[in-house]
Image: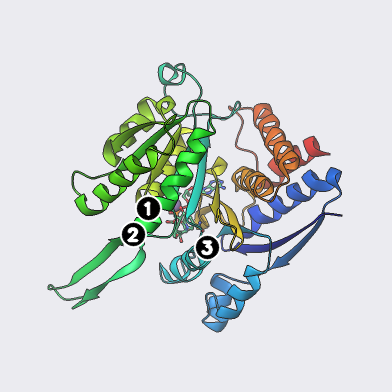
Amino acid sequence: PRTLDLAVIGGDGIGPEVVGAGLDVLRAAVAADGVDVRTTDYDLGAARWHRTGETLTDADLDAVRQHEAILLGAVGDPGVPSGVLERGLLLRLRFALDHYVNLRPSVLLPGATSPLAPHVLDKGPVDFVVVREGTEGPYVGNGGALRVGTPAEIATEVSVNTAFGVERVVRDAFARAAARPRRRLTLVHKHNVLVHAGHLWRRTVEAVNAEFPDVSVDYLHVDAATIFLTTDPQRFDVVVTDNLFGDILTDLAAAVTGGIGLAASGNVNPDRSSPSMFEPVHGSAPDIAAQGVADPTATFLSVALLLEHVGLGEAAARVQEAVVGALADRDPSAPRPGTAEVTDAVRARLA
Ligand code: NAD
Ligand code: IPM
Ligand code: MN
């Protein structure tokens, strides 16, 4: 039988809660296909750091690499200096495994509640995907600080954009746009100010467009993109953007399409030279951790992306359908259901 061998990184805060629920749903979804799911839990995150001072060792990384895919909850903890786990664990995984496509679909599902006004939503369905570059930009850690804590302190974070890195993510975004009915690609950047990186992105999009003549291209500065995300989200089909703009836009996109509890993502290595990693867009939410109230839906939809990626498309569709059904059954005026309640509703539909 087909086996599915997963690395599981629950991480911190609500991470283990939503990942536990996600694995239940994954198992229920593949049961009909007779898939033998094997999981290996990795003890990574705040607890490990407090105990050993380690974030992600070379041995951890070598072990994680051996799996077919990775399911991650979230990392980050108020008791750990900000950045230690985010950079040392999460970004290290994304960079080392060359997750250059950070795929973040934004679909307003039936049953989800958008905060946008009815006259905006009446214009049509909201269904776009952000292709966020995942290995470069201001995230690379190219910077430093001088004279820290003095009035003369200087801090820099230099955004690194390579022709190689921009071209490969732009080509991936074009291919995704070409496969969608509307075949539309929007580059989001800020080339009126960030002229060096901005013009590289712009020239790259122009050049790659020649390979995808059926895709129509437009451009928005990131500030204006936030306007249209809330006043005319229907205009977006595929958005391609850099690592930091993509981070910010996808939290906004999540809010617009029903909330951060529903937003899924895949850190994809399209070349399949290493396992891709699937995780909710949200963080460890320390404000609601250990209360059983985290919405696991974002993780379920991330599981669907994972299943699709590993070639279990039917199981992915079952998860998607079960999530949509369970959402549609929610009473928007009732208090938000807890983690177990949402999980049971989705599992019941998969049974
Ligand atoms: P966050 O996404 O954790 O929380 C923002 C708000 O959304 C909070 O009010 C939280 O309660 C709510 N929320 C998040 N997920 C939810 C869910 N599933 N159901 C219901 N409500 C939910 O973002 P933050 O507060 O900026 O960051 C908290 C920590 O998480 C920080 O350490 C940050 O670095 C880290 N973080 C990690 C990831 C990741 O691992 N991928 C992503 C974002 C933030
Ligand atoms: C996300 C998070 C991460 C990011 C942080 C925690 C490094 O915000 O996955 O969106 O900025 O990419
Ligand atoms: Mn984010």
| Percent coordinates x, y for residue 244 in the rendering | 36, 53
- Residue 233 position within the rendered picture, expressed as x and y whole percent measured from the top left: 41, 28
Q: What kind of residue is marked 3?
A: Val
Q: Are marks 1 and 2 in contact (CB under 8 Å)?
A: yes
Residue count near mark 1 (Cα–Cα under 10 Å), binned few <14, some 14–19, many ≥20: many
Which amino acid type corresponds to the residue marked 2 in the rendered image?
Thr
- Foreground disc of the pair 2, 3: 2
- Residue at the spot of label 1: 166
Residue farthest left in this picture: 152
> Looking at the picture, which amino acid does disc 1 mark?
Val
Mark 3 Cα within 10 Å, few/some/many (few <14, many 20+)?
Answer: many
Q: Position of residue 80 (x, y in %)?
A: 46, 71
Vertical side of 88 occupied by 263: above or below: above
Total numbered labels placed on residues in the image: 3
Q: Is mark 1 within 8 Å of ligand 2?
A: no
Between residues 54 and 67, which one lies in front from this camera angle?
Answer: 67
Sequence-first disc among 1 and 3: 3
- Inspect this view and state whether residue 258 appears: no
Q: Which residue is mark 3?
A: 75
* 161 or 333, nearer to the observer: 161
Q: Which mark is residue 162?
A: 2
Work out how far the residue at label 2 is from the one at label 3, CA to CA, in angstroms. 28 Å
